[in-house]
Image (cartoon, rainbow, N blue to C red):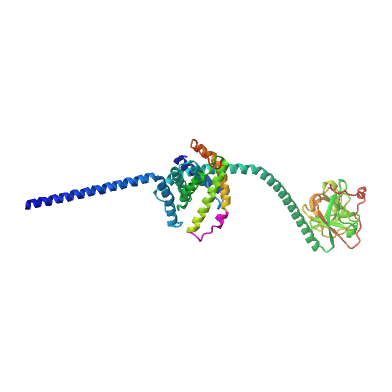
Amino acid sequence: MGAQAAAGRDAGVHLDSVGSQAGKCKGFGELREFGRTVLTLLKRNRELIVVSVLLLYPLTSFLGKRQVAREANIIDRAVLALTSPLQRALIWTLDGAASAWTGYAALRGVRAENLVLREQNRQLKSEVNELAEVRTENERLRKLLDYSRASPDPQLTARVLGVNPAATFLSLRIDRGEADGVRRGMPVVTPEGVVGTIQRVTGSYADVVLVTDPNSRIGVKVQRSRVRATATGKGESRALHLDNALRTEDLQEGDQVVTSGTDQVFPPGLTVGRITSIQRRSYGMVQSAEIAPAVDMTKLEEVLVIRTSAPIAPPPTNGPQARRGVEPAP
Amino acid sequence: MKFVTTVLLTLLLLTIESVVVRYLGFSVTRIDVTVAVVAFLSLRATTLEGAVSSFAVGYLLDLMSGRPTGIYTFLAVLTFLVGRLAASLVDVRSALVFVIFTMAADLGHGLLAIFFSWLTSRDAAFGSTLSALPLQVALTGLAALALYPLFRKFDSGNERSELGLLR
């Protein structure tokens, strides 16, 4: 009985085990069925699921991080590593093309710009020349003004309008005349030295006969040795001749010659020039010399007319040329 | 268009866009070439293929923006889906209609981008972005006009047979 009972218990246990296994088998089947159903469902709705994931994953990522940029993950790095060289090559190509085009466009504009700049350069050069001219004129006028202030006699500044075209009569025309108080015989000077005397006066113009004119005579003296003499114009040589110095007088090359005032035209002490050569003949009582004028008569632009109050004798210009006028320079 | 073709083309267009925008000096306004790509995908690709390609396009835009937040990836897929819905109603076969389609897509895309940016960062000033949107849409339309023949060349043989409301 006991054995039967034990056998029965064993059988019961076995049956339970079988039943349990059967239950398990049933559970697996259900699970498998469930899995199959899910798989079918997934397959059927694959498109919807994939699209939903593709749509919702970036949205939740964006909303979750609230605009905070994520760190580059391995996929980002891989994509960047693959795309960067291509991107760099494209940018290099496009940049090169853009630079070439920009360069071409710039070159097209260069010619027109060059023409404009050339024109500007020409205008600026012209302005610079004008300014230099004004500056030079300013310096000359300042010198004249300084000289005029230092001189005891009243002086009048005059602009040179033209020179006499005839070479045998060395004169020039100034823009001051009777209206300005200019009278015949008045001396004309510059800060460098004597220029000449007023030969003819009209309303607003006056002609000046230069000291280098052959008809001109000036009483002079040698500044160093005080030797008195007469300086005569030599005409075309643009030089003066020193006459009437006694043979025994002391003359040396390089001596400064100034006006003596004895001719009653030029005030004493005005620079005439410098002795360049001395001629002493073996006979005769006098000696002569060449004087280089202190003033370059060919470059005169402004002069001073000394308005002496005392009546001045007209300069000794008795030649036929003295009656000729002067024409303005072209 | 094939997935790889789409990705390479998008990469090329984004690179060109970055250079063009830099040369033309657009500070705020952009040319949304990716929207043009997505719009074309919504007209020609299947839903799954197009969604994956759009995801890739948006991901590339996010990545190349230098500030990947995921917003452009999401918007690309969304634009594709909405575009696909619209494409069931209209048939886009001419360049002009494609331009209109792309401009509409870009307008929606731009407004949504502004909205989502505002949603997450309310203190930012979006006035300038919003005022620049019309120009951005117009430029994108021009880009779509230029790109349409190229897209068609890459997608030859995949034309739809059914007709929509517009031709």
Q: Look at the picture and state if A62 lies above or below A93.
A: below
Q: Look at the picture and state if A28 lies above or below A271.
A: above
Image coordinates of residue B141 in percent, x first then y, are 56, 46
Instruction: Give A327 or A153, whichever is nearer the viewer.
Output: A327
Image coordinates of residue A56 in percent, x first then y, are 43, 52
**Furthest residue to the front?**
A1
Instruction: Give A97 or B47, whichever is nearer the viewer.
Output: B47
Q: Look at the picture and state if A195 lies above or below B91.
A: below
Residue visible at 56% across and 44% down?
B99
| Magenta stretch contains residue A175 | no
Count the marks. Answer: 0
Q: Is residue A278 left or right of residue B66?
A: right
Image coordinates of residue A57 in percent, x first then y, are 42, 51
| Magenta stretch contains residue B124 | yes
**Furthest residue to the top?**
B157
Instruction: Give A15 or A116, whichever is nearer the viewer.
Output: A15
Q: Is residue A301 visible?
A: yes
Q: Is residue B76 left or right of residue A287?
A: left
**Magenta span covers which residues?**
B121-131
Q: Look at the picture and state if A216 lies above or below B88.
A: below
Q: Quadrant of the C terminus of chain B?
A: top right
Q: Is residue A97 visible?
A: no
Image coordinates of residue A182 in percent, x first then y, are 89, 58
